[in-house]
């Protein structure tokens, strides 16, 4: 394939891998035109499908519901809570509004909800709906919903088999002074012959570590993709695990609907040290043991598959919110 054809093919594959926000906004806005009572009349019917599940299916659903909503005792809402019927899309964080409203429309508009949109890295003082939370044993006030799906839940159909990929590590990402982990990683491995890693920002004094952007298709030509948290979770983790490449990363500090804390190191992804000192050592081990590398790819795909069942995802979301409203005292 010639250089010109390669560039065209790369652009086409990037088009295939992308989620299109404008279509998402259009579809979500159209849904708002549907009267809320039609959703509310279906809520109990959808929740009742739980009773038709097998015991093993119920156990799986219960585990996820209680993972996302860890509350077990009644709680009082904050004075900043909003009635569901008053929620409106703002100029910013529209995807959070649309994803929240997609589920909350199944409940009466006079119900109250606390929420924090955006990259949440701390636990709210009152139980609130969030996209992300820190991984710890005191995060009960952070109620996870599947928010900002258009960005975080992208599962590409990777057409490049693992064996056909480069025996190299790749990373591209934004740089800001708060991204200490990213700076630490690039400082250690920029310029290494086995690592095509760089940032794409115009940030002084790090311009000597800058390289052009790579699209998703170009990055998936590498066997290993480094995944590094930014403000909260790493957006790339989902699409890397859905691909035929392998995610490499330190143990995550934050989690979302993806349940990052349940990922098993060296089973779903290759875990590296927090200082990234063993990156090349780990990479060389899996290059020398391709069967173990392919097993991680297979395990990652199986993990991803649990999020593809749209009806079950909706049921779990409704049960998370139903639990939240039932425990709300006022």
Image: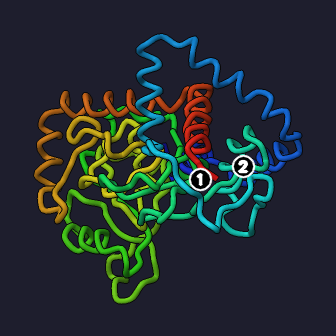
Residue 92: percent from left, percent from top: 68, 68
Q: Quadrant of residue 175?
A: bottom left
The one nearer the camera, 252 or 10, is 252
SS at mark 1 in the image: loop
Task: Give the x, y percent position of residue 250.
Answer: 24, 55
- Frontmost residue, 62 versus 268: 62
Answer few, some or many: residues within 10 Å of disc 1's Cα (few below 14, many 20 plus, some between 14 and 19).
some
The answer, for residue 200, to whether it is visible in the render is: yes
Q: Residue at x 30, y 52 (%)?
A: 137
Tell me the number on the disc at residue 53: none
Give percent across and percent down for residue 196: 30, 61
- Give the secondary structure at mark 2: loop
On screen, 198 above or below 13?
Answer: below
The disc label shown at residue 111, or none? 2
Q: Nearer the viewer, residue 90 or 213?
A: 90
Disc 2 versus disc 1: nearer the observer: 2
């Amino acid at each position: 394939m010639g250089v010109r054809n390669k560039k065209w093919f790369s652009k086409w594959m990037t088009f295939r891998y992308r989620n299109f926000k404008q279509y998402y906004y259009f579809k979500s806005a159209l849904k708002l035109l549907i009267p809320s009572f039609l959703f509310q009349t279906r809520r109990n019917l959808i929740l009742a499908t739980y009773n038709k599940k097998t015991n093993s299916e119920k156990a799986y659903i219960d585990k996820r519901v209680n993972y996302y909503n860890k509350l077990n005792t009644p709680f009082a809402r904050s004075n900043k809570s909003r009635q569901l019927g008053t929620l409106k899309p703002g100029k910013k964080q529209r995807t959070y509004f649309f994803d929240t409203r997609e589920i909350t429309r199944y409940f009466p508009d006079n119900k109250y909800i606390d929420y924090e949109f955006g990259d949440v890295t701390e636990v709210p003082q009152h139980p609130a709906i969030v996209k992300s939370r820190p991984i710890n044993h005191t995060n009960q006030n952070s109620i996870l919903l599947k928010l900002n799906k258009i960005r975080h839940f992208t599962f590409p159909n990777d057409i490049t088999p693992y064996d056909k990929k480069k025996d190299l590590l790749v990373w591209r990402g934004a740089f800001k002074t708060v991204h200490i982990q990213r700076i630490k990683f690039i400082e250690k491995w920029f310029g290494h012959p086995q690592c095509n890693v760089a940032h794409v920002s115009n940030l002084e004094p790090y311009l000597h570590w800058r390289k052009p952007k790579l699209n998703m298709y170009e990055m998936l030509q590498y066997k290993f993709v480094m995944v590094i948290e930014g403000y909260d979770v790493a957006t790339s983790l989902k699409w890397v695990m859905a691909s035929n490449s392998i995610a490499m990363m330190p143990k995550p500090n934050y989690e979302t609907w993806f349940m990052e804390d349940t990922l098993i190191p060296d089973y779903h992804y290759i875990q590296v040290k927090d200082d990234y000192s063993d990156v090349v050592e780990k990479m060389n081990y899996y290059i020398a043991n391709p069967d173990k590398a392919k097993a991680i790819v297979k395990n990652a795909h199986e993990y991803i598959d649990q999020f593809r069942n749209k009806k079950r995802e909706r049921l779990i979301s409704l049960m998370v919110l139903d639990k939240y409203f039932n425990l709300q005292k006022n």
